[in-house]
């Protein structure tokens, strides 16, 4: 059976984390718990990518941790 790729989407943190019927927590609480240590080995690399994405104006696209490239910019019209 073939399964389609899951496209990442930007979350806002208010999304519920639920078990079968009950809200357990939300995405923001998870982020705060898991990623508050920005100078940790894994997090600081993602933070550096985010800062570069901000400089390039592409920070609204979600990060794909196992993507082919760290960041993808739109084509430059300068070279047309």
Image: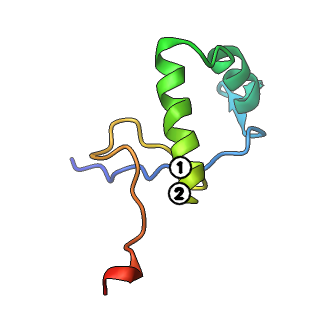
Mark 2 neighbour density, 10 Å: few (under 14) some (14–19) many (20 or more):
few
Tell me, yes or no, if residue 69 can be seen here: yes
Across and down, in percent, residue 48 comes to 52, 33
In which quadrant will I find the C terminus? bottom left
Residue 76 numbered tag: none
Across and down, in percent, residue 28 comes to 74, 30
* Residue 32, quarter of the rendered image: top right
- Residue where numbered disc 1 is placed: 53
Left or right: 69 as drawn, with respect to 52: left
Q: How many marks?
A: 2
Viewer-proximal residue, 12 or 76?
76
Left or right: 39 as drawn, with respect to 2: right
Q: CA distance from mark 2 to mark 1?
A: 5 Å
Across and down, in percent, residue 12 comes to 73, 45
Left or right: 31 as drawn, with respect to 68: right
Q: Tags 2 and 1 in contact by the CB under 8 Å rule?
A: yes
Q: Residue lying furthest left in this view?
A: 1
Name the residue rendered at 76%, 23% in the picture: 29
Name the residue rendered at 31%, 81% in the picture: 79
**Please, what secondary structure does the residue beneath circle 1 have?**
helix
Name the residue rendered at 56%, 31% in the picture: 47
Name the residue rendered at 37%, 73% in the picture: 75
- Residue where numbered disc 2 is placed: 56
* Residue 20, quarter of the rendered image: top right
Tell me, yes or no, if residue 21 can be seen here: no
Across and down, in percent, residue 39 comes to 59, 15
Viewer-proximal residue, 60 or 2?
60
């Amino acid at each position: 059976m073939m399964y389609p790729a899951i496209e990442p989407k930007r979350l806002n943190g208010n999304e519920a984390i639920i078990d079968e019927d009950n809200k357990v927590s939300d995405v923001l609480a998870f982020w705060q718990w898991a990623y508050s240590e920005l100078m940790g080995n894994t997090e600081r690399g993602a933070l550096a990518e985010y800062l570069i994405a901000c400089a390039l104006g592409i920070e609204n696209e979600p990060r794909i941790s196992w993507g082919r490239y760290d960041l993808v910019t739109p084509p430059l019209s300068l070279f047309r």
